[in-house]
Image: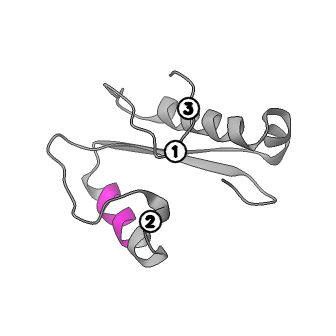
Amino acid sequence: RGSLAGPVFAAAVLLPPGFHYPVLNASKQLSETRRNALRTIIEREAAAWAVASLSPSEIDAYNILWASVLAMHRALDALALRPGFVLVDGNRFRPY
């Protein structure tokens, strides 16, 4: 969850109904090469996507766990479309 220094980032993606791509899985289970290839596919096929970050000073204020969650909320806020539900690639989240 994040590096020792620098901002923390989170992405939100709205995939169209019926979207399926065989190797799309939890990000930590994918190689860097596969993640980069999937990024192109997701950006092209997604109904909407957004990336958000929190600065190191915000991480210090919230701690890395809750800063990660806040980054997820900011990414959701930045989507051009509102999601019907949220599926999180992680083990902690606060209601959105």
Q: Is residue 30 above or below residue 89?
A: below
State the image coordinates of residue 18 (x, y, percent, origin top left).
14, 45
Q: Give the numbered dot on residue 53.
A: none
Quadrant of residue 37 in the image?
bottom left
- Quick one: which residue is furthest to the front in this view? 91
Q: Position of residue 95 (x, y in %)?
A: 52, 21
What amino acid is found at the position of numbered circle 3 in the picture? Phe
Residue at image mark 3 = 93
Q: Residue at x 81, y 47 (%)?
A: 56
Name the residue tied to disc 1: 90
Are the residues at dot 3 and dot 1 in contact (C-beta closer than 8 Å)? yes
Residue 85 spot, x, y in % from top left: 34, 27
For the residues bearing labels 3 and 2, Cβ distance under 8 angstroms = no
Q: Position of residue 57 (x, y in %)?
A: 85, 42
Q: CA distance from mark 3 to mark 2?
A: 20 Å
Neighbourhood count class around disc 1 (C-alpha, 10 Å): few under 14, some 14–19, many 20 upward: few
Say whether residue 34 is left or right of residue 6: left
Q: For the residues labelled 1 and 2, say whether their Cβ atoms are less than 8 Å apart.
A: no
**Within-10-Å neighbours for mark 2: few <14, some 14–19, many 20+:** few
Q: Amino acid at mark 2?
A: Gln
Q: Which residue lies at the image location 52% right of the left edge and 38% below the top edge?
A: 75
Q: Which residue is mark 2?
A: 29
Q: Is residue 39 above or below residue 70?
A: below
Rendering quarter of residue 16? top left
Pick the residue in front: 85 or 80: 85
- Sequence-earlier tag: 3 or 2: 2
Residue 38 belongs to the span the image colors magenta? yes
Q: What is the CA distance from the residue labelled 3 to the residue labelled 1?
A: 8 Å
Specify whether 18 is left or right of 95: left
Disc 1 residue type (three-letter): Gly
Residue range in magenta is 37-43
